[in-house]
Image (spheres, helix red, strand yellow):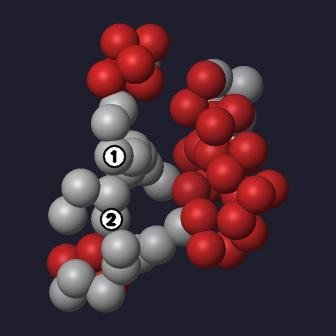
Amino acid sequence: MNVMLTRCRRGMVVVSSKSFLQRIAQKTLVGQLAAYWTAQEGVNAWVNTQDVMNSRVDLPGA
C-alpha cells in the first residue's frame, strides 16, 4: 500500500465493498482512507459499478 500511495500521479481509485471497509477493514489504512474520503465528500466518495462501466463517473487518469 505504501508504494502504491507514493506512485499516484493523477489520483487513486479503490475498488472494494463499502460495507467491508466500514466494518471489517475499518482499522486498516484503506479503511481509514475510506472514512476520511466519506467525511470529506459524503455520498459522492462512492460510485457504483454500473456508473463506472457506463462512463458516468469522472475517474482520475481516464
Q: Is residue 39 visible?
A: yes
Question: Which residue: 54% across, 67% down?
Answer: 46
Task: Say which element carries label 1.
Answer: loop
Q: Amino acid at mark 1?
A: Arg
Q: Position of residue 12 (x, y in %)?
A: 39, 44
- Name the quarter where the C terminus is drawn: bottom left
Question: Residue 40 sits in which quadrant?
Answer: bottom right
Farthest residue, direction right? 39
Q: Position of residue 18 (x, y in %)?
A: 56, 56
Q: Position of residue 11 (x, y in %)?
A: 39, 46
Give left or right: position of 10 versus 5.
left
Looking at the picture, does residue 40 appear above or below residue 43? above
Q: Is residue 50 visible?
A: no
Question: Which residue: 73% across, 69% down?
Answer: 42
| Total marks placed | 2
Q: CA distance from mark 1 to mark 2?
A: 9 Å
State if disc 2 and disc 1 touch (CB < 8 Å): no
Earlier sequence position, callout 1 versus callout 2: 1
Looking at the picture, does residue 25 appear above or below residue 12? above
Q: For mark 2, what is the residue?
A: 59
Q: Position of residue 20 (x, y in %)?
A: 57, 46
Farthest residue, direction top? 3
Task: Say which element carries label 2.
Answer: loop
- Name the quarter where the N terminus is drawn: top left
At label 1, counting other C-alpha atoms closer than 10 Å, the crowd grade (few under 14, some 14-19, many 20 or more) is few
Question: Which residue: 20% across, 86% down?
Answer: 54
Residue nearer the viewer, 42 or 60: 60
Question: Residue 49 sits in which quadrant?
Answer: bottom left
At label 2, counting other C-alpha atoms closer than 10 Å, the crowd grade (few under 14, some 14-19, many 20 or more) is few
Q: Amino acid at mark 2?
A: Leu
Q: For mark 1, what is the residue?
A: 10
